Amino acid sequence: MQPGWSKQIRRIVTFAAAAALLLLSPLSPASAADPVKVGFSMAMTGAVAQNGKQLLIALQLWRDDLNARGGLLGRPVELVYYDDQSNPSNVPGIYTKLISVDKVDLLLGPYATNMAAAAMPVIVENNKVTITMLAVSVNRHFDYSKYFSMQPLGPDGVKAFSKGFFDLAAAQTPKPQTVAILSADAEFAKTSADGARENATAGGFKIVYDKSYPPPTTDFAPTVRAIQAAGPDVVFVAAYPPDTVGIVRAANEIGLTPKMFGGTMIGLLITPIKTQLGPILDGLVIMESFVQAPTFNFPGVADVLKRYRAVAAGEKIDQLGYGFVPFGYAAGQVLAQAVEGTSSLDQNKLADYMHSHKFATVVGDIEYGKDGEWTEARTVFTQFQKVAPNNFEQFADGKVQPVLWPPQYKTGDLVYPYAAAKQ
């Protein structure tokens, strides 16, 4: 052996032994600490920011609860998110960045139909699972097997947003005959209006007014006067938060008094807006996905809402959170249960598991159909009754907004016609 070779061989053997020990080690400290990244866009500014901020707090509570229990697959969970500004055109770029640059492990969202529809082409192209939040029947356009919804529409799809409304109208004596449909010219409102047309036609109603308006509209007086001129018995409106305020105020000022008035008016799910409008809300019948009622007191939801309110107290957002917070937290619960059930981040395994299992959440048990929608609807219709001015607390217990439909969740009766509720 040449001089020095023995020392060189000893160095090689020592290096090989050290390498073997590293390979045999289950995880290095650095990799063990690598987080499971959950990515999404959220409306933090813009027209639906009031709702997006609630959902973000809900997801942060879910993350903290999960990490307190050890995270997912023994790793902490990290939220990676960007403000989509309530603008669908921002969403494809955000989801491309989440997938390609941030390399997130899991996706959620987006929130709202407009944004979810815009994200889907990117999500489909990259073969990712997602759970959209409070988006309406988005997958009917894509038929994508890894799409899942956190929206309790059930198999009725778009019709679930107005079925109860028209069922209530049809039950009145004498039955109202004519309908006006007004909607914003944007994805959610148009989809809701599509369902309203189907339900109105199926219920034997005659549609005498059916128009949309551009989302930037602020003056609704001409629109309301046109509806009044059409003389409908029933008025169904699908609107976003700013539009809701404008439409309700214009209807009150002009004196629009059909026999029944309401719809999917998203602004009326936000407590500060309800407080601001006060008694002029009386008589309106609206669709809701989650309400303060004994039949909705699912395990864990009271605790989540209590902790949300502690955070929201310092923010200029809805202090109650009924309409949005439970769904944000539940979306995280479904995702976590799928990861834990499969012990995997594999997108195909997660999708298969989510299609074949029931999930226990703060919005009740959820099962998914082939299209990624809930197998059982859980939407309700409520009516504003005897609302006091400038009183935030009255909306905390549901007494001024009894549930009218469906029968299994009913807590009060419809005051009909609309004019009677306004007296």
Image (cartoon, grey):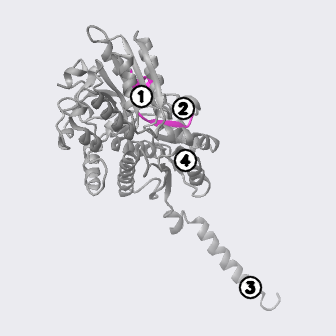
Q: Quadrant of the N terminus?
A: bottom right
Range of magenta residues: 145-162
Residue 316 sits above or below residue 224 on the image: below
Q: Which residue is mark 4?
A: 91
Gap in angstroms between the C-alphas marked 2 and 1 = 13 Å
User: Is residue 244 in the magenta section?
Assistant: no
Query: Residue at the right extreme?
Result: 2
Which of the pair 269/36 is nearer the observer?
A: 269
Indicate the quadrant where residue 18 lies: bottom right
Q: Which residue is mark 3?
A: 8
Q: Which residue is mark 1?
A: 153
Residue 118 sits above or below residue 371 on the image: below
Q: Which residue is mark 2?
A: 139
Name the front one of labels 3 and 1: 1
Name the front one of labels 2 and 3: 2
Which of the pair 351/310 is nearer the observer?
A: 310
